[in-house]
Image (spheres, helix red, strand yellow):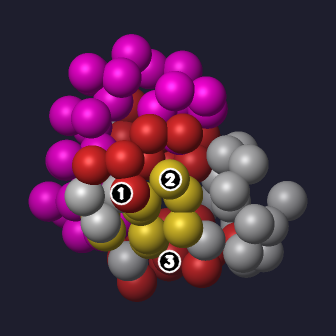
Amino acid sequence: MCLTKMEQQIIEEVTKDDFFEQGVDSCVWTDVFLDDTCTIPAKQARGVLSSLVKKEYICPMGKGRDSYIEFTDRGKTYLKEILHVEHAN
C-alpha cells in the first residue's frame, strides 16, 4: 500500500517524539505529538493520522487527552524496512 508524502512525514516525525522510547513498540501521546513534535498543522495532521489508521499503519488508543498512537504490525514493518528503526534513538 502506497503512502503519501505527508503520511511518510508523520511516521518519520513520530520516531522523533520524546515518547518514542521503545522503538517500534513505542506509544506516543497524540496531543503531545501534535503540539510539540509534528511540523504539520494540527488540523491537517489529524487528517493524515486518520488516513494512517484506515491504511492500518497506526492504531489510536484511548480518548481525548488520554489518547495515544501505537504502530500496527504493518506500521512496525514500515519502520523496520523503510526507516530502519528497531529500537529507540
Residue 58 horizontal/vertical position (percent): 34, 64
How crowded pointer 1 is (Cα within 10 Å; few <14, some 14-19, many 20+) is rated as: some
Residue 87 horizontal/vertical position (percent): 78, 75
Identify the residue under disc 1. Answer: 67
Mark 1 residue element:
loop
Residue found 67% across the figure and 46% down from its top: 17
Above or below residue 64? Residue 89 is below
Mark 3 residue element:
helix
Residue 77, numbered circle: 3
Residue found 85% across the figure and 59% down from its top: 89
Q: Which amino acid does label 3 sit on?
A: Thr
Above or below residue 86? Residue 6 is above
Quadrant for the N terminus, please.
Answer: bottom left
Residue found 24% across the figure and 69% down from its top: 56
Q: Which of 1 and 41 is in front in this view?
A: 41
How crowded pointer 2 is (Cα within 10 Å; few <14, some 14-19, many 20+) is rated as: many
Above or below residue 26? Residue 82 is above
Residue 15 horizontal/vertical position (percent): 65, 52
Q: Nearer the viewer, residue 36 or 14?
A: 36
Question: Which segment did they paint magenta?
Answer: 33-59
* In front: label 3 or label 1: 1
Q: How far apart are marks 3 and 2 (CA)?
A: 21 Å
Residue 75 horizontal/vertical position (percent): 43, 70
Is 4 left or right of 8, judged from the image as shown?
A: left
Q: Quadrant of residue 24?
A: bottom right
Residue 29, numbered circle: 2
- Looking at marks 3 and 1 on the same chain, the residue that comes earlier in the sequence is marked by 1
- Looking at marks 2 and 1 on the same chain, the residue that comes earlier in the sequence is marked by 2
* In front: label 3 or label 2: 2
Image marks 2 and 1: residues in contact by CB distance under 8 Å: yes
Q: Distance between the residues labelled 2 and 1?
A: 6 Å
Q: Which residue lies furthest to the left in this view?
A: 54
